[in-house]
Amino acid sequence: MIQSLVPVRPGILEFYIAREIAVPYLTSFIFLTSLFVSLVLKDAIGELLGKGVSLLRVFQYIWYLIAEKLTLTIPVAGLLGGIMAASRLSTDSEVTAMRASGISFYRIYKMFLIYGVFSAILVAAVYFYYGPRAAEGREEFEDWLRTYHSLSLVQPGGFMGRGGFDGVSKKGQDIYAAERQGNILRQVQIREWQNDLDIKNTEYVHLRETSIPIGDGFMTRIIHADRGELLVRKNQEGHDEKFVRLYEGFILELNEKKTEYQFTDFQKGFLDYVFQPPNRTIGKLNVKPDNYTFLELFDFLYRIDTEGHEINTKALFEKVGQSGGQEGEIVRLPPIGEMQALKTELEIWIMANQGKVNRPDGPSTQEYQDRMQQYAQFSAFLEDTTRTRLRFAVEIHRRIAAPFVCIAFFAMAFPLGLVFKRGGKGSSFALAVMIYIGYFVVLSESLKAGYQDRLHPVLAGWLPVMGAGIAALWLLANRTDDFPLSLLWKRLTGPLRPYTAPVFFRLARARGKAIARVHVFLLSFRNRLARIGQKNRDRGVP
């Protein structure tokens, strides 16, 4: 009969083992978290504090980073802390003393499993709610930073873009400075660009008898100045507005007809330039599932399958750089089923009228071309929607499965600590890193296969955790003699041992002979290489 995981009254031994696990666990967690934060902020912290960003904002940003990555640091800290705790107990012969006193392995590693359950609850809370909220807060902070402190982030020798380009935006700008000394910039260049998609005048790419427009992109304005100064002033709303005042420069600007560039010289004057705020979003359709809470993931899938999504037309027009749309005017995007039906209707119409263009009973060339264009755009949008839905489905199963890896890591930490008891903390750290790298590789590949529809979302989310769990069960079954699965296996295979023992004995003897032969071959090969080297040295061959 399997004992209860949590004893009714934890004894002195349970408290002692819990304390031995807590110290390396918390130490590993603090170390990994500090390492992660330092790597992220090593170049940005000075700029943030030195360019007007309040200390409270900086700490808020750090908290967003920490909360967003707790799902990474907690499992690794548990694996590393568990291995270090088990290794110390085994190195000091405390495990041997406990076993000699009649204490079962199960009572010892039970505390490791309790820590695994506790860590799994923390990771689940982060995955289901706090992680997405932290990611959303981090992105809002970065948008605020780009809006009100964008010029403060200019670094010498590289272009700083406005960001936010997502294939729908029509305008953007980049700023470059060759040198920077405090608020003084040298050799400043600002480039403004624009993307157009004129269906009638654009060039087309023909793919599988479908014409796809490629649009046009060009520079609308280039501003160059020998010197620039970062300044602050009050805007019309009373807020601080950072801008760059440019001296000794010129402007190249494309005219409205896009036929030639006009030159403007301000060598003897100055020009004030303000970066525009980031574009408004058009809703949560082209999004990452990382920013959704667990319940919002289900809501997104429900809407995309049944009700469709809604967007604000005013925000959409502002996104593409045009005027139009009324605030509060909503456009409904159909669900996947309706979109597939519409795509099928367009495909049938195109095939039925393919040979009737410019005939009395057929469409005109322009009408046929418009339908072809609608079909190409609709197919691309449907494909993107289907891919987005698949990513959300995989994300749901990944979030359900991921907390269980904490239990698997703590479960395998105990037997691994018993095996690597003489390597010290360095060996424990290296072992934990290698195990997590292997888990992360399997996780990345399974998620990629799930996103590409080569693996079912359930398998894509659960396969890495199942692998870690099987490895943990195998280690516990082989390194402990009272593990429930070990006892069950021994009880099931007991009647077969008289028949299987000779077979396993022969296999073991054959394995020993094979290893001995490989060892002899390697020794002979090494001796042969040594003789060849000695002959070359005797002949004076380098």
Image: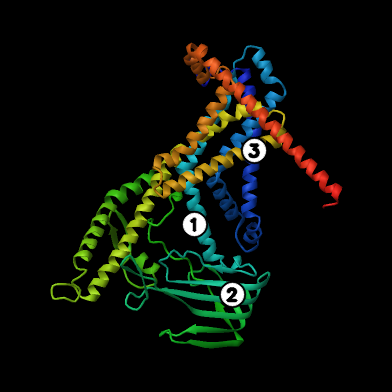
Residue 236 is left or right of residue 323, and the answer is right
**Is disc 3 placed on a helix, strand or loop?**
helix
Residue 296 is left or right of residue 271, and the answer is left
Name the foreground residue: 31 vs 435. Answer: 435
Residue linked to disc 1:
140
Looking at the image, tell me whether mark 2 or mark 1 is earlier in sequence order.
1
Name the foreground residue: 369 vs 232. Answer: 369
**What's the CA distance linking mark 3 and mark 2?**
45 Å
- In the image, residue 9 lies at what x, y percent? 55, 17
Residue linked to disc 3:
28
- Judge depth for marks 3 and 2 and give the one in front: 3
Q: Is residue 110 visible to the viewer in this orientation of the structure?
A: no
Residue linked to disc 2:
244
Q: Who's the residue at 49% across and 15% down the image? A: 493
**What's the CA distance linking mark 2 and mark 1?**
24 Å
Query: Label 2 sits on what residue type?
Result: Val
Q: Report the number of numbered marks.
A: 3
Residue 496 is left or right of residue 343, and the answer is right
Query: Label 1 sits on what residue type?
Result: Glu
Q: Could you say which disc has been placed on residue 299 in the image?
A: none
- In the image, residue 26 lies at what x, y percent? 63, 36
Residue 444 is left or right of residue 105, and the answer is left
Looking at the image, tell me whether mark 1 or mark 3 is earlier in sequence order.
3
- In the image, residue 424 lies at what x, y percent? 72, 32
What is the quadrant of residue 209 in the picture? bottom left
Contact? badges 1 and 3 (CB < 8 Å):
no
**Is disc 1 placed on a helix, strand or loop?**
helix
Crowd around label 2: few <14 · some 14–19 · many ≥20 (10 Å): many
**What's the CA distance linking mark 1 and mark 3?**
30 Å
Query: Label 3 sits on what residue type?
Result: Ser
